[in-house]
Image (cartoon, grey):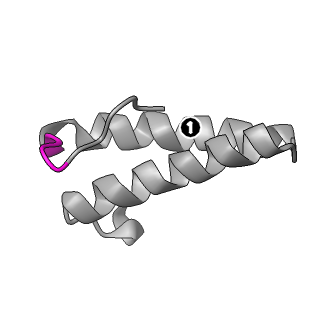
Amino acid sequence: MLDNLESSYDCSNAGEDLHRLKQELAELRGQGSEDAEAQERINRLENQISFIMNKCDINSGNS
């Protein structure tokens, strides 16, 4: 999970960051944990992925 995403995010890091975030998200989902803390982490990862894809104009079909 990235610590801080802002409007000044550098899209040149998007490929690597998205790959890492999606791996982390898949691991969390694979654990099947449904507690509030796990769900909060999943939501935050999904938000970070969406932010990067929107900010850097990345089509979800290409990921």
Does residue 42 lie above or below 47 as drawn? Answer: above
Residue 63 vs residue 26: left or right? left
Say left or right for 4 vs 24.
Answer: left
Residue at disc 1, secondary structure:
helix
Residue 12 horizontal/vertical position (percent): 13, 39
Magenta region: 7-11
Vertical placement of residue 23 versus 11, above or below: above
Q: x and y percent of residue 54 in the render?
A: 27, 65
Amino acid type, callout 1:
Gln
* Residue 59 place in picture, x, y as percent: 31, 69
Residue located at (45% from left, 33% from top): 20
Give the image location of residue 41, x and y in percent. Answer: 64, 41
Q: Is residue 40 magenta?
A: no
Residue at 17% over, 42% down: 9
Q: Residue at x 86, y 43 (%)?
A: 35
Please, what is the dominant secondary structure of the magenta stretch?
loop
User: In the image, 36: left or right of 48?
Assistant: right
Residue at 42% across / 52% down in the picture?
49
Of residues 5 and 13, the one drawn nearer to the viewer in this rendering: 5
- Residue 17, quarter of picture: top left
Residue 31 found in image quarter: top right
* Left or right for 59, reference 34: left
Using the rendered image of the protein, determine whether residue 18 is visible from the camera's viewpoint. Answer: yes
Q: Quadrant of the C terminus?
A: bottom left
Pick whichever, 39 or 50, lies toward us. Answer: 39
In the rendered image of this protein, does residue 52 appear above or below residue 41? below
Please tell me whether residue 10 belongs to the stretch shown in magenta. yes
> Mark 1 sits on what residue?
23
